[in-house]
Image: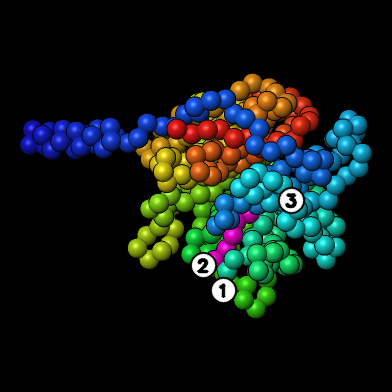
Amino acid sequence: MTARRPLAAAVLSLAAAACSTLPAPPRATAPPAVLVTLPDDCNTPDGCTLTDAGDILLSCPNFNNAALQKAGMIDRAYPSKMVRIDQANRLSTWYEFKPQDLHPDTGKVCPMGCDIGPDGHLYVADSQVFNDPRYKSRLLRIRVADGRAVGCDVVVEGFVCANAVIWRGDTVYVSETILTPPKKGDPLISGVYAIPRADWKERPVRLAPWTPEKADPRLIAVYRTSNRIGFGADGLTFDGDGNLYCGIFEDGIVYRTRFGADGKALPPEVFARDPKMACCDGLFWSPKDRVIFVSDMLNNAVQAVDPQGRVTTVWANGDTDGADGSLDQPCEVLVRGRELIVVNMDMWWECEWLTNTKIDKPFTLSAIRLP
């Protein structure tokens, strides 16, 4: 035992030195400001991604239509759409869903997480769970030609609640926020699918419904969580080493999935858990800052998780309508230049842990200046 103590001390010393070389976690240099004020037909923004040109593509499922109409804040229900915010922060419609794009059973389309694939097309989670939780959610491909969206088709079917979308190589990763609707008192089961692009070469993929005895072979991670809200696996991101991270919405936990030499996913492990982080919605790995930014919807906050799994609050504020740029139920984050851009979903529901207390105007994206 005595011979091992110097070695252990040396290992601890090296670990401490490695930690000391990590950059200081980024914090806001000023309060958030309004990046864009959205019109009534973009009343519930959600997922977003960056183009190579630095434009933001933003999904607007407009889940708040009914509540806003009832409150007299909008005059009609607006269809879902995809919009673009260019580098000058000018807003334009990027894609309007056509009648043939709507789900044949629900008559609706509900775009959420999105990412650009290696083929240049935009892949969008169509989360139908609020319309029908019986495996109606899909992964859509919005086809792009000469920089313009020209059409939409279905590439994967059979999700309960498709949510985040991220590409790595020729494989798309999609978080399944509810693998199967849980019974009261049972844990919530959720997960992540890894679907190679070749799988839908001839026809759309149809995922096999999950059961405890059998899962679709494309399911690479499964999480069992508290079921205190009913939403599990949510935001996804990859770090510079190719590790996959998934945030658990209801529990505020970030899981890491490593991959073996054969490319197969290893069992997920808890990477970050901290009392100050109540919720993990959208995730974004920033190579420059060497942190994962996390939209903490319950706390009206953005957190930063460093490579050691330590959590720092970048910004948090109380209940607000967001008119001054304050966070108003943030659901998504990304970094463009030295701005941390935050999507404010402002989709209130009755929840004792939610800082936001009502749906209100304006509909905004916020920008936090980073050092």
Kindly report the distance in space between the C-alpha atoms of the residues bearing marks 1 and 2.
8 Å
- Answer with the quarter of the image where residue 120 lies: bottom right
User: Which residue corresponds to the image point at 73% horizontal and 56% vertical from the top-left?
Assistant: 94
Disc 2 crowd rating (10 Å Cα; few below 14, some 14-19, many 20+) is few
Q: Earlier in the sequence, mark 3 or mark 2?
A: 3
Q: Quadrant of the N terminus?
A: top left
Amino acid under disc 2: Asp
Query: Dots 3 and 1: beta carbons under 8 Å?
Result: no
Residue that sits furthest to the top in the current view: 318
Q: Name which residue lies at 85% across and 35% down.
A: 68
**SS class of the residue under badge 3?**
strand
- Distance between mark 3 and mark 1 Cα atoms: 33 Å
Q: Is residue 367 above or below residue 124?
A: above
The question of residue 115 being in magenta is answered with: yes
* Residue marked by disc 1: 198
> Which numbered disc covers residue 108?
none
Q: Which residues are magenta?
A: 113-118
Q: Which residue is mark 3?
A: 92
Circle 2 SS class = loop
Q: Amino acid at mark 3?
A: Ser
Q: Could you tell which of marks 3 and 1 lies nearer the N-terminus?
A: 3
